[in-house]
Image: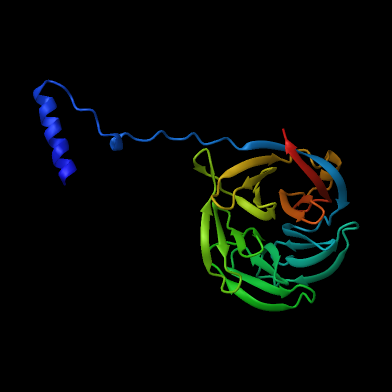
Amino acid sequence: MKAAVWWLGATVALAGCGKQPTPAADVIPPPVAAEAEPVAYTYDVINVFPHDRGAFTEGLVFLKGILLESTGLNGRSELRKVDLSSGRVLQQVRLSSQYFGEGMTVLGGRIYQLTWKNQVGFVYGLDSFEPEREFTYTGEGWGLTTDGHSLIMSDGSDQIRFLDPATFKVTRTIGVRRSGQPLTQLNELEWVKGELYANIWQTQTIARIDPATGRLLGLIDFSGLLTPDDYRGGGIDVLNGIAYDAAGDRLFVTGKNWPKLFEVRVRPK
């Protein structure tokens, strides 16, 4: 209170001399830092592998030389183990027709798989593919990945949730922004070198996201992966499906009903 009384007295004295007081420093708003534009990236194709054109890809994981894949559509949703070089399905579990399969990841020797609108997920044994339990969540299920500790889930909005894999409770949430606006339609997720990669639905773009803050670090343009011949016969849908081989530092991408899966190297434009 003493400082406030002194300041008031000083103000009165200055006013009597015909001078205006200098505004207190703590009422001057700090400058607003400009948000950095996300870095633009493109790609080089390193290898091309066959992919089942009937697979409506929703989740993709590379593990010990093979691919795990979750596919969607009611009546056609599956969990698969796939040979990378041939695209041959080695093992599979079909979901009941009431479920539309979505994102999938592996953590602690178990496979976790989401469904779209049922608010139900499934846990399977990694080797057996046998269902072990179910779990629930609110809202839609889109993408799923892990940082080795949490399950990380997207729901088509700008929000990404981190879930405890034992209780499935949300431990924290980040919001992804671009130029100050929510970046929505975040779909399939992958953890790559400490970053989150996310397919942006209905685009040929994958977002690179800071998992601590939700800050958009970059945008990878995957336009031109498929050739005109690949589109013959129809049925090809959007880019969706990211898998990372941490041991070999290899990145794979594909899409819903795509005939090919690509090993790519990302570089700045």
Q: Which residue extends farthest left? A: 16
Residue 50: % across, % down: 87, 53
Front residue of 179 and 155? 179
Q: Which of the 4 quarters of the picture holds residue 268?
A: top right
Colour setup of the view: rainbow
Residue 106: % across, % down: 71, 66
Front residue of 37 and 157? 37
Is residue 186 found left or right of 227 in the rendered image? Answer: left
Residue at the location (16% across, 22% down)? 19
Residue at the location (31% across, 34% down)? 28
Front residue of 97 and 189? 189
Q: Which of the 4 quarters of the picture holds residue 207?
A: top right
Residue at the location (78% across, 50% down)? 251
Vertical order, 208 against 130 (above or below): above
Q: Which residue extends farthest top? A: 18
Is residue 85 found left or right of 68 in the rendered image? Answer: right
Front residue of 147 and 125? 147
Q: Which of the 4 quarters of the picture holds residue 4?
A: top left
| Image mark count | 0
